[in-house]
Image: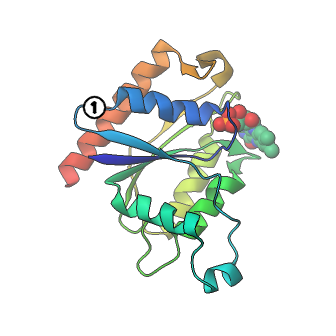
Amino acid sequence: MKILGVSGSLRAASYNTALLRAAQELAPEGVSIEIFGLHDLPLFNEDVEALGDPAPVTAWKQAIAAADGLLIACPEYNGGVTGVLKNAIDWASRGSPSVLAGKTVCIVGASPGVTGTVRAQDSLRQSLRKCSAEYWPLSEMLVGQAHTKIIDGVLAESSRAYMGRHLQAFVDHLRRAA
Ligand SMILES: Cc1cc2nc3c(=O)[nH]c(=O)nc-3n(C[C@H](O)[C@H](O)[C@H](O)COP(=O)(O)O)c2cc1C
């Protein structure tokens, strides 16, 4: 089973990207998690799209299409999804059908605040619904006060257990649905 991990942060020391790295280490037997970096995606522009998808966009869409499920690490900026992540969703939403249609998505998120990206995750679910993606219904992993739980890019033991359970339940869900 192949899961595609995507972080909505480009920051080298991103807490959200750290969640994905922990997920890679905790992947259940028979599951691989590849992280797709969004650094090279241009800003969405219909004029650019009309000339044909730029190579990074093609790579992004192909990576989604090839995955059995998506694991999105969703940071929160100003109560919503980061521009980086929303831009990536907007590119992926294009095409008939969109590569996101019917794709099952698990959402996780970390922030130094106490609410741990709950607002951004809700906003992301709204966008995914519009793209006909299926977010996993139990999918809510909120890592609040991330600066106390992710030190030097490493997730603390208690949160690793949380991630391990969350990931296992997602994989069980994907296997049942397959
Ligand atoms: C423009 C901006 C807006 C932010 N707004 C929020 C917010 O609404 N809620 C929140 O919990 N954190 C907010 N933060 C703090 C981020 O959660 C924090 O920078 C976090 O580390 C970003 O995720 P990353 O570590 O994966 O890069 C904001 C940060 C920036 C730069």
**Within-10-Å neighbours for mark 1: few <14, some 14–19, many 20+:** some
Closer to the camera in the image, 34 or 145:
34
Quarter of the rendered image showing ligand 1? top right
Residue at 64% from the left image edge and 57% from the top image edge? 40
Query: How is the model colour-coded?
Result: rainbow
According to the picture, the residue beneath numbered tag 1 turns out to be 28
Quadrant of the rendered image containing residue 65: bottom left
Residue at 52% from the left image edge and 15% from the top image edge? 156
Left-right relation of 148 to 69:
right
Quadrant of the rendered image containing residue 89: bottom right
Asked if 93 appears above or below 5 in the picture, the reply is below
Residue at 42% from the left image edge and 58% from the top image edge? 63
Residue at 47% from the left image edge and 39% from the top image edge? 140
Left-right relation of 136 to 61:
left
Q: Residue 60 appears at what percent x and percent y?
A: 50, 61
The amino acid beneath tag 1 is Pro
Residue found at the far front of this picture: 55
Closer to the camera in the image, 12 or 71:
12
Q: Residue 148 appears at what percent x and percent y?
A: 65, 16
Closer to the camera in the image, 11 or 169:
11
Left-right relation of 155 to 151:
left
Q: How many marks?
A: 1
Asked whether mark 1 and ligand 1 are closer than 8 Å, the reply comes as no
Element under disc 1? loop
Quadrant of the rendered image containing residue 145: top right
Asked if 5 appears above or below 21 in the picture, the reply is below
Q: Is residue 145 visible?
A: no
Q: Is residue 9 visible?
A: yes
Q: Residue 159 appears at what percent x and percent y?
A: 48, 20
